[in-house]
Image (spheres, rainbow, N blue to C red):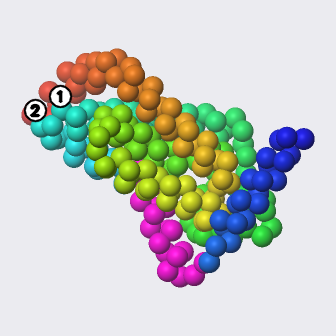
Amino acid sequence: MILARLADLDTKVFYWINHLPHGQVFDWATRILHCATYAGIIYYPFLIGFWLTHNYNYQLLAKLGLFSGVLTYIITDLVIKNLTARPRPYKVLGRAICVRPAPGDYSFPSVQAGTAFAVATLYFLIFPEGSGGYLLLLFGIAVLLNRVYMGHHYPSEVFVGAVIGCACSIFVFEYQQIFLKIISSSWQVIGPLFAR
């Protein structure tokens, strides 16, 4: 009974966001945001740039961010999506509006929401006094709303994806010494290849 009510609420909130005004400008803006956040594309150039700085905290953000992003991807996209096999809302809801490009894989949970919140959470953990975390949080919220607006995810899926992303960043941050040792030992192996 409770699950049925939650599913009904999920569908109602989906339609409310998905049926906000659509048009060429809105739909193109959502496509740009979708493509920029697909597989974390927008984050990785920044993380690599941070890695190349001489600032310890930015380097830490880059190194842990790469681990957190990969861990979020593995948990959301490779494990949970294949276990739950939940179809995309635009495929099962008759009144859903789908903004292309439409993903063809399973829906639950959202890896894009997970990655957005993984980066924002890690930023807050490393720079607790900085205002950049709030900008990343606002960007993450935009990603969440965008995924539902495009018809690609239910609200519950972006919420769970965001929670997984936050949890992955907290895990990586708490056990950072292990992850930093992995990077250090890996760099000893591949570093000489770049020195040539």
Where residue 179 sits: x, y (%)? 34, 22
Task: Name the outermost residue toward the bottom.
Answer: 24
Where residue 37 sits: x, y (%)? 44, 55
Decide: few, some or many residues near mark 1? Use Cα within 10 Å; few <14, some 14-19, many ≥20: few
Task: State whether residue 106 appears in this view.
Answer: no
Where residue 61 sits: x, y (%)? 29, 36
**In the image shown, does 191 or 63 lie closer to the viewer?**
63
Task: Name the outermost residue toward the right.
Answer: 1
* Circles 1 and 2 in contact, beta carbons < 8 Å: yes
Residue at the spot x=56%, y=66% of the render? 101
Q: Main secondary structure of the magenta part?
A: helix
In which quadrant is the N terminus drawn?
Answer: top right
Residue 177: image tag: none
The quarter holding residue 51 reads top left
Residue at the spot x=24%, y=21% of the render? 184
Residues rendered magenta in the picture: 22-41
The residue that disc 1 covers is 191
Q: Amino acid at mark 2?
A: Ala
Where residue 188 sits: x, y (%)? 20, 21
Q: Amino acid at mark 1?
A: Gly
Does the magenta run of residues contain 38? yes
Residue at the spot x=44%, y=67% of the render? 32
Q: How many marks?
A: 2
Decide: few, some or many residues near mark 2? Use Cα within 10 Å; few <14, some 14-19, many ≥20: few
Does the magenta run of residues contain 42? no
The residue that disc 2 covers is 195
Task: State whether residue 108 appears in this view.
Answer: yes
Classify residue 33 as left or right of residue 181: right
